[in-house]
Amino acid sequence: MKIKAQIAMVMNLDKCLGCHTCSIPCKQVWTNRQGAEYMWFNNVETKPGIGYPRKWENQEIHKGGWQESNSKLRLRAGGRLKKFAGIFHNPDLPRIDDYYEPWTYDYGQLTSCTSGQRQPTARPKSAITGRNMDINWGPNWEDDLAGVNETGVEDTNFSGLEKEIYLKFKDVFMFHIPRICEHCLNPACVASCPSGALYKRDEDGIVLVDQERCRGWRYCVSGCPYKKVYFNWTEGRSEKCLFCYPRIESGLPTLCAHSCVGRIRYIGAILYDADRICSAASVSDDRQVYKSHLNILLNPYDLEIVREAEAQGIPETILQAARRSPVYKLAVEWGLAFPPHPEFRTLPMVWYVPPLSPLIVGMEESEVNLDKSDFMRIPFQYLANLLSAGDETPIRFALKRLMALRKFMRSVRVEHHPDTQVLDEAQMTEEMAQEMYKLLAIAKHDDRFVIPATKRADTENMHDGRGILGFSQGSQPVID
Amino acid sequence: MEALFSKLVFQVFPYIALTVFVVGHSYRYYTDRYHWNSKSSELIDRDSLKVGITMFHWGIIFTFFGHFFGLLTPQNFLNKLGITAGMHEFVALYTGMLFGTMSFVGLLILLRRRLGKDRVHATSSTNDIALLILLVIVVFLGTYNSYFKRFDVLYTIAPWIRGIVTLNPDQGLMAPVPWSYKIHILLALALLAFSPFTRLVHIWSVPVTYFLRPYISVRRRFVDIP
């Protein structure tokens, strides 16, 4: 057993209102530059929809992530030799139009134009060519289902469902999904990089691009199944979400998490067994990947694991944080959060709590014996396709718990008569429900974010480390 | 006068070019590693890239190895292996024609793309365009020579080039060489001198280490204190 720590995130989609506040500080701090203006390390998509870049989930087109064949794991886009031989032209690279052609507006025109018959206009100008352009796609084109009756049919999460029904106005459903880099345990971008510029940090699992070692081969961009590595068209290098590591190191939450007005994001440490990553990612059935992923996340309360972790040099601060980790609770202990598209087999570490949704009108009273959650507007199958490779069982269980929690808290706070029966049905205890309520509904800052600050002064030779790794153009870190 | 000119061009200039080549690369590597890449424009205009770039790269790679081994291996040595000058010339000529044409056509497609596609043109620097034009000229002359100016290279240019390596270039060997060859050689040397300051530096980053490392790289931030 090789115990490693990962700083992971959970987003509670049940509470995401799609306000895009998370995207703003991220953009302002990290991608507010020429060549990076089209990149959104954090973006918020409306589901159903094909997202940003277009159809990123469809690996038939984009060839991202891993594939299992004969219990061996292969990069879907091809291995080392294929990449090496075709390095001049990557056929799987998204076009910039799949993201969108970045643009600005000719604001100067508003104040500098001569007086005339018509209102002055600020026309959109391409940020690449500087010429006038027509905007016909953008980072958030499908916001709140805009145009989804046309684009939605291409949404791969509809597989096994009659998508036409759900794209009709009467039965339509929607929810938001904010997306950042998944900081996977088995990152396909890292595996795809011919130069070895991408790496996973040993101490907190953050996946970074070494900017001085990136040679712009672009395989990481196409290799990432979540399309969260971007190519800077001015500098000729790849860039990606940093999980705000300078903030994480200081014990602060990422900008997206900190700015979230819905308080939907949770950050915490998770211990995992690095020796079992490969076997977990290469189970034969897509639907088993979620379970095998769960299995390699270690219980931080287990004394044997704690002892072993200490012996392997995991700092006490991380072990303490892992025991208080909201992420461990939501993902492992309570089974409420799920990895997006586990079938990509990268073992992502930014998980989602599936959203509850209103019951379809007229259905809720008709057949009393049926599970009410079957009448939720968002079909289970859709959520399962998104979060558990199509396996409805764990999603049902999680939503049942969320429903039970609501019923129970209603019985406590409104009816003043705690109804523990609903909890029993969802295999919950009263204590667990109270704790869930505190974390999900009250969601205090210090409960949502349990981030062990890195005490570099105690653990490292600061003299050796002086001056290295500024995050723009710093020198490269020492390679292990 | 002519002797002086010949000395400058065929004895001094190669060393200037090679010095700039070596020092320039080291300088660039230590001062500007951040921009040490191929400055790919595939993202902004992917579909127009495929044919040109593939033809050019494979063409130029084989051309490079052809030049490298063909010119640097003494014919006397090849004779011992049973490869006669005639055979050598035959192979050199026809592979040269094939790969030269491939590179040249590829380059023309790329040049047309660079100047004709709005996005690519808008993101091109003068350096990028100058480099591409220089490449077009060098490759054109080389290919032109293989088709129309056949000349006994093995006992003139080749020993002169080996002379550069052994620090004893004989400018006399270059006297009978046709001008189209001379210009090809001089521009190629100029290209070598120019290359450290262009996107060509990516040649040195051929990712051979990809085959040697495990798929997943993990790094610690600092070295642990012993």
Image (tube, coloured by chain):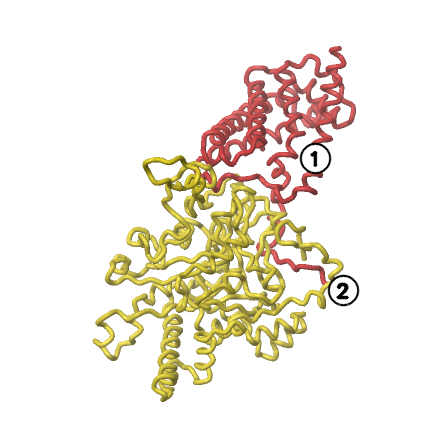
Chain colours: A yellow, B red
Query: Tag 2, which secondary structure?
Result: loop
In the rendered structure, which amino acid carries the disc numbered 1? Gly
Q: Position of residue A477 (x, y in %)?
A: 67, 54
Which residue is drawn at the image coordinates 36% and 86% (left, top)?
A419
Rendered view: A218 above or below A168: above
Query: Tag 1, which secondary structure?
Result: helix
**On the image, which quarter does residue A300 sit in?**
bottom right
| Farthest-out residue, top | B1
Quarter of the C terminus of chain A within the rendering:
bottom right
Query: Cα distance, mark 2 to mark 1?
Result: 38 Å
Which residue is drawn at the image coordinates 38% and 87% (left, top)?
A418
In the rendered structure, which amino acid carries the disc numbered 2? Pro
Label disc, if present, on residue B24 of the rendered structure: 1
Q: Position of residue A361 (x, y in %)?
A: 23, 70
Residue A174 in the figure: left or right of residue A198: left
Between A436 and A87, the one nearer to me in the picture: A436
Quarter of the N terminus of chain A within the rendering:
bottom right
Q: Position of residue B142 (x, y in %)?
A: 59, 22
Q: Position of residue B164 (x, y in %)?
A: 74, 25
Label disc, if present, on residue A157 of the rendered structure: none
Which residue is under mark 2?
Answer: B226
Q: How many residues crowd mark 2 within 10 Å: few (<14), some (14–19), many (20+)?
A: few
Q: Identify the subunit bearing mark 1.
A: B
Rendered view: A245 above or below A117: below
| Farthest-out residue, bottom | A417
Residue A365 in the figure: left or right of residue A470: left
Q: Identify the subunit bearing mark 2.
A: B
